[in-house]
């Protein structure tokens, strides 16, 4: 896939590669600095994201913004936010393998265009898609992985953290690992 940003955005917005296009309001490309050092990858748009065409705009988005602020980052400033899936699964169900397979080339192209210094993967489907593994997040946390030579840090999805408050402390550890990893890349 050798598209520039405009071609990629248009391809995502008009994609019919899986059945999700039939129930979505719009495709959700991503948002932020297209030359960011930080790439945040979530799972799939929810209802708010589908309506607004931007990732992480609901309650999970508010928590993500707070998480980023806690490590000195702000949405849109050296940060790009995307999802593995570009269309909302009905009822916020889990993505099907064929849906991930249809959308993953778009995310891969976004990564090629952005050339981030670090990827922060949020949630099981983002983590498993990028690392090509079936392992649970709990087993993958706490260390730096690689995605095509780019350091990748794993943590829980903000929507999960809203339902599982005790795991916020673990997510904080992951954010600190990401911040330390980025600092080591710059030194």
Image (tube, grey):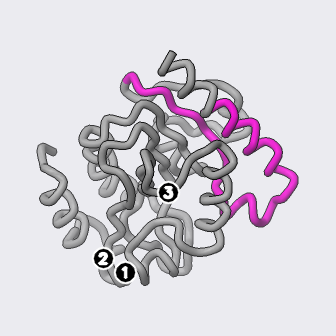
Residue 102 part of the magenta segment? no
Q: Which quarter of the figure has residue 114?
A: top left
Q: Mark 3 points at which residue?
A: 75
How far apart are the two marked residues, 1 and 2, measured between alpha carbons?
5 Å
Q: Which of 66 and 122 is in front in this view?
A: 66
Q: Which of 57 and 33 is in front in this view?
A: 33
Badge 3 element: loop
Label located before the other in sequence (2 or 3): 2
Task: Establish if 178 lies above or below 17.
Answer: above
How crowded pointer 3 is (Cα within 10 Å; few <14, some 14-19, many 20+) is rated as some
Give the number of marks: 3
Residue 171 part of the magenta segment? yes
Q: Are marks 1 and 2 in contact (CB under 8 Å)?
A: yes
Q: Name the residue under label 1.
A: 24
Q: Name the residue under label 2.
A: 21
Badge 1 element: loop
How far apart are the two marked residues, 2 and 3, measured between alpha carbons?
27 Å
Which region shows up in magenta? Answer: 149-178
How crowded pointer 1 is (Cα within 10 Å; few <14, some 14-19, many 20+) is rated as some
Q: Are marks 3 and 1 in contact (CB under 8 Å)?
A: no
């Amino acid at each position: 896939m050798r598209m520039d940003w405009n071609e990629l955005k248009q391809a995502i917005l008009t994609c019919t590669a899986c059945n999700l296009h039939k129930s979505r309001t719009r495709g959700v490309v991503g948002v932020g600095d297209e030359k960011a050092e930080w790439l945040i990858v979530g799972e799939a748009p929810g209802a708010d994201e589908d309506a607004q065409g931007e990732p992480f705009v609901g309650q999970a988005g508010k928590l993500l913004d707070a998480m980023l602020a806690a490590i000195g980052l702000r949405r849109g400033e050296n940060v790009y936010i995307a999802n593995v899936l570009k269309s909302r699964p009905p009822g916020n169900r889990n993505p099907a393998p064929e849906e991930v397979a249809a959308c993953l080339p778009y995310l891969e192209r976004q990564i090629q265009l952005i050339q981030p210094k670090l990827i922060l993967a949020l949630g099981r489907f983002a983590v498993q898609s990028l690392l090509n593994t079936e392992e649970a997040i709990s087993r993958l946390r706490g260390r730096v992985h690689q995605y095509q030579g780019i350091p990748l840090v794993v943590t829980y999805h903000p929507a999960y953290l809203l339902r599982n408050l005790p795991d916020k402390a673990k997510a904080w550890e992951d954010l600190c690992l990401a911040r330390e990893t980025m600092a080591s890349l710059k030194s």
